[in-house]
Image (tube, rainbow, N blue to C red):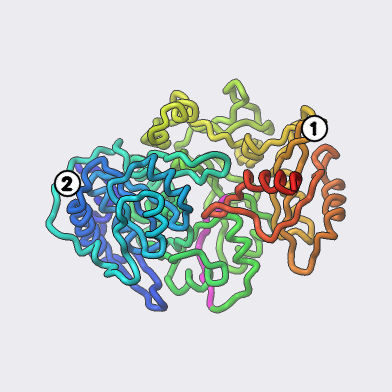
């Protein structure tokens, strides 16, 4: 029985159909499924000559480029395990992943090879400028391909580490297949669709929702080397995209840029994280599209909740539970909470099938998070009478003030509506009397100054209970973020400590 790995899905598609489209220095380059199959076989042969065998880890640290896809699919063909990382990681960040994953080979670009060497990586195989970018896909003699099982690890995806050191989430071939089929079904994907991938390929979003759903339907992907807020719409149009996937922060960045040319009309755009109704309406009108909010984690693989791909979608909701997902909003004892009450999002599933297999070489963390088939997300939400869920906060972002729970997300939502606030984030900081105080960190809109601090606090006071009003307001030029736009709240707390001690 043939296992439907990514490599097998490429082989099963019509050879003449377009698989990927790239804009290389102003020239559109198209790769058909047949060409992609040849590239993955050649890349597998090249990796084999480097000694890669079944179960070995293949570290790839590249921007969004064709070679990333070649290596991903070639690793699956060999039964090896893909380990993708952010090419702009620091030496310390690379060193952590390299020590944890222990890869047999590293594939990198010329621009980050020295950083990887300093981190102790195997001598990187370089692709890109100054090197023949086709060398890796030129291959050599064929190598024996070991049998691959659906439950075998296909990738180790390292979490963004906003609150702790990144852990490697083990994703199996069955996981990839399950999320591809689920998203393709929900979004009514056909072979004529084309995802515009502007988020990084090393991240779960681009792999799970876009690439995998395209592969299971024989559709295509249009790939931008890096996200560009000013060119997102024109790139999507130039590359013939019909679908997109973003986070809320990139959407706000796109809306802050003027129209610079003919922009795409997309039939739908997936997004995650908070977006105001005003911003959602503006984005939908500008791109003649439908925004579909979802909720998901690297560990959940499938998005446990997603809005209807119809006019019934709600911008402020993370959507109803996805068909086939067993989700429970649970209290501290693991019991279901009634509608309207906040509980932790827990997902029942079989590790390695409809949720991730666990954490690489971290059995204790795996046992705690994947507790007897119950994935504890650490995220809080509530459900309305219509079955729509609403994100409340990360459990770790709940601020405890004198026995009262304060949702950082609630305060952020209120503060963000002030005319002076472009973006904001809320964290808890130590308070000698009340345990924790609320700190609001603000990026101001152009034309406003820090003098608006008291006005912003008054704005919050009119709309929030007194104990939720920010005690401290700090102003910054930019919020520290991960590669996909998540705010690094630990850095905001550290910033406050530095200011206080300074």
Circle 1 Cα neighbour tier, 10 Å, few/some/many (<14 / 14–19 / ≥20): few
Q: Which residue does the image show at 26% across and 62% down from the upper left?
A: 36
Instruction: From the viewer's side, name the closer residue of 198 and 336.
Output: 198
Residue 375 lies within the magenta run: no
Res. 295 in view: yes
Quadrant housing residue 131? bottom left
Q: Which residue does the image show at 38% across and 73% down from the upper left?
A: 24
Residue 269 lies within the magenta run: yes
Q: Which residue does the image show at 46% across and 39% down from the upper left?
A: 167
Task: Tell me the residue that label 2 is attached to.
Answer: 145
Instruction: Locate the N terminus by quadrant.
Output: top left
Task: Tell me the residue that label 1 is attached to.
Answer: 432
Quadrant housing residue 30? bottom left
Quadrant housing residue 206? bottom left
Which range is magenta?
262-272
Instruction: Point out residue 237 in the picture as x, y percentages from the top left corner.
Output: 48, 72
Q: CA distance from mark 1 to mark 2?
A: 62 Å
When the figure is inspected, residue 403 is found, relative to residue 222, above or below; the finding is: above
| Circle nearer the N terminus (1, 2) | 2
Circle 2 Cα neighbour tier, 10 Å, few/some/many (<14 / 14–19 / ≥20): some
Res. 9 in view: no
Q: Which residue does the image show at 53% across and 54% down from the upper left?
A: 484
């Amino acid at each position: 029985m043939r296992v439907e790995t990514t490599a097998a899905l490429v082989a099963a598609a019509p050879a003449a159909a377009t698989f990927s489209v790239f804009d290389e220095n102003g020239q559109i380059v198209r790769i058909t499924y047949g060409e992609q199959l040849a590239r993955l076989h050649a890349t597998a042969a090249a990796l084999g000559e480097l000694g890669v065998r079944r179960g070995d880890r293949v570290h790839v640290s590249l921007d969004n480029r064709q070679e990333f896809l070649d290596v991903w699919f070639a690793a699956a063909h060999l039964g090896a395990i893909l380990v993708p990382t952010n090419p702009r990681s620091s030496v310390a960040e690379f060193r952590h992943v390299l020590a944890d994953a222990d890869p047999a080979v590293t594939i990198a670009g010329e621009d980050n090879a020295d950083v990887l060497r300093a981190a102790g990586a195997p001598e990187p195989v370089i692709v890109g400028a100054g090197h023949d970018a086709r060398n890796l896909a030129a291959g050599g003699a064929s190598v024996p391909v070991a049998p691959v099982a659906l439950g075998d690890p296909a990738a180790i995806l390292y979490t963004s580490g906003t609150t702790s050191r990144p852990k490697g989430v083990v994703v199996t071939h069955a996981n990839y297949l399950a999320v591809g089929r689920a998203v393709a079904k929900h979004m009514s994907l056909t072979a004529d669709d084309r995802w515009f991938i502007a988020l990084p390929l090393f991240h779960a979003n681009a792999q799970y929702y876009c690439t995998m759903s395209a592969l299971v339907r024989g559709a295509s992907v249009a790939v931008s080397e890096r996200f560009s807020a000013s060119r997102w719409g024109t790139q999507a149009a130039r590359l013939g995209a019909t679908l997109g996937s973003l986070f809320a922060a990139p959407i706000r960045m796109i809306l802050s840029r003027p129209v610079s040319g003919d922009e795409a009309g997309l039939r739908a755009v997936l997004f995650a994280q908070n977006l105001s109704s005003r911003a959602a309406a503006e984005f939908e009108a500008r791109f003649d599209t439908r925004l579909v909010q979802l909720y998901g984690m690297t560990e959940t693989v499938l998005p446990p909740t997603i809005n209807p791909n119809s006019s019934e979608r709600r911008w402020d909701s993370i959507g109803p539970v996805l068909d086939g997902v067993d989700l429970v909003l649970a209290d501290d004892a693991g019991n279901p909470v009634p509608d309207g009450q906040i509980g932790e999002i827990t997902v029942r599933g079989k590790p390695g099938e409809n949720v991730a297999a666990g954490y690489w070489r971290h059995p204790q963390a795996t046992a705690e998070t994947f507790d007897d088939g119950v994935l504890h997300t650490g995220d809080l939400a509530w459900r309305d009478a219509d079955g729509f869920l609403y994100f409340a906060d990360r459990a770790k972002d709940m601020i405890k003030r004198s026995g009262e729970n304060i949702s950082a997300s609630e305060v952020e939502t209120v503060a963000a509506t002030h005319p002076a606030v472009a973006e904001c984030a809320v964290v808890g900081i130590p308070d000698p009397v009340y345990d924790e105080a609320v700190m609001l960190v603000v990026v101001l809109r152009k034309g406003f100054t820090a003098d608006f601090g008291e006005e912003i606090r008054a704005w919050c006071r009119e709309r929030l209970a007194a104990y939720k009003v920010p005690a401290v307001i700090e102003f910054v030029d930019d919020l520290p973020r991960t590669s996909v736009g998540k705010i690094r709240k630990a850095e905001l707390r550290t910033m406050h400590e530095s200011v206080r001690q300074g």
